[in-house]
Image: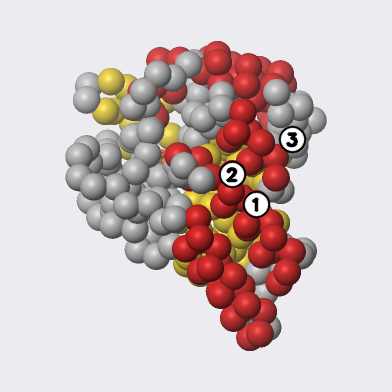
Amino acid sequence: MSTFLFHDLIYGPIKSRRLGNSLGINLLPTDKKYCNFNCVYCECGANVPGGKINLPRRAEIAAALSEKLKQLHSQGIAVDSITFAGNGEPTIHPDFEGVMQDTVNERNKYFPEAVISVLSNATRISKPEVVEALMLIDNRILKLDSAIESTAKAIDRPVGEYSVARIVDLLKGFNGDFTLQTMFLEGDVNGVHINNMTEQEVSAWLDVVKTTRPKKVMIYTIDRDTPEQNLRKATHEELDSIRDRVKAAGFEVSVSY
Ligand code: SF4
């Protein structure tokens, strides 16, 4: 298994399947993954406990972003999205709110049309300062991999406390102003069979879509190497069938195969 780590604070712009010409920002360490989930499918690999965690400081991030945007602007290179993803969960950064403020300022200077997106596992939306920070930007892309507690925990392997019911309640607080992102897959991990595409799973998940009313739903499947080996990608037919049900319920949906 090879892992895919971002070795820079700022990377790209890269052509994203979902976000266009996307400049990436990695608020996590550049030498290891740092996340409060340990998803079976994580492209960054499995969590490795211990060791020093070096996070970039707010001033360093703002200076690097300003420099990069200035350079891209002068070269005539388009930026459709400034996207916070990287080697773990971006909202863990202690200055997350300040970083969002700085990013809005820099975006407005150089690429006012670009959207700022954060890909988050939604574990920290119980914190008012995290929600306030997420509301400063354009796209809150929040993960929920199953509406069923045991399946969500088997897929995402949260490091601390995690409750799907609690996350769903908190998602309702966004009044639909977020994107729901879900990874679909099947597999066996440590003797446990996982499949979030059964009728029971999809229908419970669809109920969450209907009660939280996201402005957009993104569904996708495995695209790179995963830390767990016995996983299977969702087929085109499986994803199309879920997509059609989301559409029929009246929601905008995108699929990445
Ligand atoms: S939430 Fe994202 S970074 Fe964290 S383990 Fe899951 S896939 Fe990896």
Q: Is residue 37 above or below residue 95?
A: above
Residue depth check, mark 3 versus mark 1: number of the one nearer the observer: 1
The local crowd at label 2, few if under 14, some if 14 to 19, many if 20 or more residues have their Cα within 10 Å, is many
- Sequence order check: which comes first, mark 3 or mark 1? 1
Disc 2 marks a residue whose amino acid type is: Glu
Circle 2/circle 1 CB separation < 8 Å: yes
In 3D space, how far apart are the residues under numbered discs 2 and 3 (Cα atoms)?
A: 18 Å
Q: Is residue 167 above or below residue 176?
A: above
Q: Is there any visible trace of residue 13 in the rendered image?
A: no
Disc 3 marks a residue whose amino acid type is: Asp
Q: Is residue 11 above or below residue 143?
A: below
Q: Quadrant of residue 230?
A: top left
Q: Secondary structure at mark 3?
A: loop
Task: Tell whether 65 sits left or right of 153.
Answer: right
In 3D space, how far apart are the residues under numbered discs 3 and 1 (Cα atoms)?
A: 19 Å
Residue displayed at 66% across by 36% down: 132
Per the rendering, the mark at residue 97 is 2
Per the rendering, the mark at residue 222 is none
Residue depth check, mark 2 versus mark 3: number of the one nearer the observer: 2
- Sequence order check: which comes first, mark 2 or mark 3? 2
Q: Is there any visible trace of residue 87 in the rendered image?
A: yes
In 3D space, how far apart are the residues under numbered discs 2 and 1 (Cα atoms)?
A: 6 Å
Q: Secondary structure at mark 2?
A: helix
Task: Tell whether 141 sits left or right of 9.
Answer: right
Circle 2/circle 3 CB separation < 8 Å: no
Circle 3/circle 1 CB separation < 8 Å: no
Residue to which mark 3 is pinned: 177
Residue displayed at 48% across by 16% down: 163
Residue to which mark 1 is pinned: 101
